[in-house]
Image (cartoon, rainbow, N blue to C red):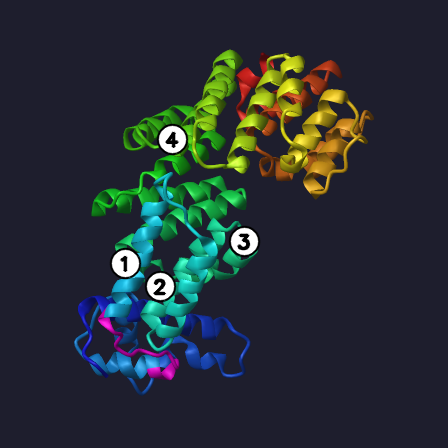
Amino acid sequence: MIRLTREEKKQLGILIKYYRQAMYRSRIANRSDFTQRNFARGICSQAQLSRIENGEPVRDHELYGRLIHKLRLPFERLRYRDVHLFDELVKNLIEYQNRSDKVIHFEKAKIQLLHFQRLFQNNIIYLHYTYALELVLHVLHEDYDEANTLCELVEETLEILPPYLLIVTLQYLGKLYVYDQDELKAQMYFQLSLEHMLKKGIENPSIYLDLARNVIYLNQDIRAREYLIEAEASFHSDPLNLLMLDYYYSIIYAKEGDYDESIGNLINTLHRLEEYPYPIPRRKNKLIISLVIMYILNGDLFNAREVLNRVPESRQTDVNHFLLAYLDDNFQKYNLFQRHYKQLASFYQNKERSRERYFELNIAPHLFVYPYPLVLLILRDYYRYLKTNKKYKKALDLIEEYQVLNILLK
């Protein structure tokens, strides 16, 4: 076995534990061979194996070699040049996600990743680095099913990751849990990413935007403002990230019932976006949708329709079509392709007494799949429905569960 650094011993110990436990959890006939006691037999004591698996280095290099050999894990030295290029890829990823004038090309990054996975196939530590980066790229590309297949593998071995890769991996695990609607788990990972960023002095201010968005969903708007102030200090001259910052402020204003401020904020944001030299239709449409919903919440249906009708047909999505149908009170007018938008249309068409049950079964469990401004509109409308039908207890329960009092009572 080649001589190992203290850090390599710690990393290999964590990986030995992960793969040994994975074998024990599997359905292979000899799974009992992978209990800690049986696995250590003939190599070291159970106490030594426990120390190794807990990341505590032991002096004997050969023990690590025999343990990873028993698990058929590869560990060979890599060329410095290959390691350096991989580190540069990770650093560039962090830099690019924090600058509007840089673009992360998913296909190019994916090709680079496959290249490094081939180079690192004989070094289990760096091979795991590529798994973490693969998860990041899948989340970045919104391929959440693929990201979820890697989630446990990455989560169980986070301690082996170097600082830059750890910071970005924690951040994108948070984004993955946002998609899975587990805001509390997302908050844990975002907070860990921030802590490591500050501890290591690594610049990654986009984490403040992720944290702000997440605590808005958790109804912690005071904390959201604190994160937005931190983001503004870092993005004072970065147009696109400032747009997202203003977008989150507009939601906070709306939750406070200050629709005029929210609308003014979004209009200014869209004006600034017009001056941006590169086309970004998806982000623009997100802001337009928010503006339309704020107009609806403010009772200005004329301006809501005017703004919505200016969106070219080629850029309209299910949420555009749903809002057009909402304004016309005609949910048969447009074909909605996504299942949750079809369900939402059915909810609004359901005038019978089963409407509460439909909300509980089909809307509430998936509520935060919708853009957050639309969530506010859905909650307001459902609250009004309950009040109109004298369902006062359910109306109070709605306020307590979603904690958006101003948006409901305005």
Residue assigned mark 2: 129
Q: Are marks 3 and 4 in contact (CB under 8 Å)?
A: no
| Depth check, front residue: 43 or 310 | 310
Residue at 40 percent of width and 58 percent of height? 133
Which label sits on residue 143? Answer: 3
Range covered by the magenta-colored residues: 69-80
- Give the amino acid at mark 3: Asp
From the top left corner, tell me how far across and down residue 140 is, in percent.
Answer: 47, 49
Residue assigned mark 4: 239
Please tell me whether mark 3 or mark 4 is closer to you in this view. 4
Cα–Cα span, label 1 and label 2 = 8 Å
Q: Of callouts 4 and 1, which one flags the residue occurring earlier in the amino acid sequence?
A: 1
Q: Of callouts 2 and 3, which one flags the residue occurring earlier in the amino acid sequence?
A: 2
The crowd level at tag 3 (other Cα within 10 Å; few <14, some 14-19, many 20+) is some
Q: Of callouts 3 and 1, which one flags the residue occurring earlier in the amino acid sequence?
A: 3
Cα–Cα span, label 3 and label 1 = 24 Å
Name the image quarter holding residue 381.
top right
Name the image quarter holding residue 88.
bottom left
Residue assigned mark 1: 162
Q: Are marks 3 and 1 in contact (CB under 8 Å)?
A: no
| Depth check, front residue: 212 or 106 | 106
- For residue 227, above or below residue 300: below
| Element class at badge 4 | helix
From the top left corner, tell me how far across and down residue 317 is, in percent.
Answer: 65, 37
Cα–Cα span, label 4 and label 1 = 31 Å
| Depth check, front residue: 156 or 210 | 210
| Depth check, front residue: 45 or 289 | 289
Cα–Cα span, label 4 and label 2 = 32 Å
From the top left corner, tell me how far across and down residue 86 is, in percent.
Answer: 31, 63
Residue 285 appears left or right of 227:
right
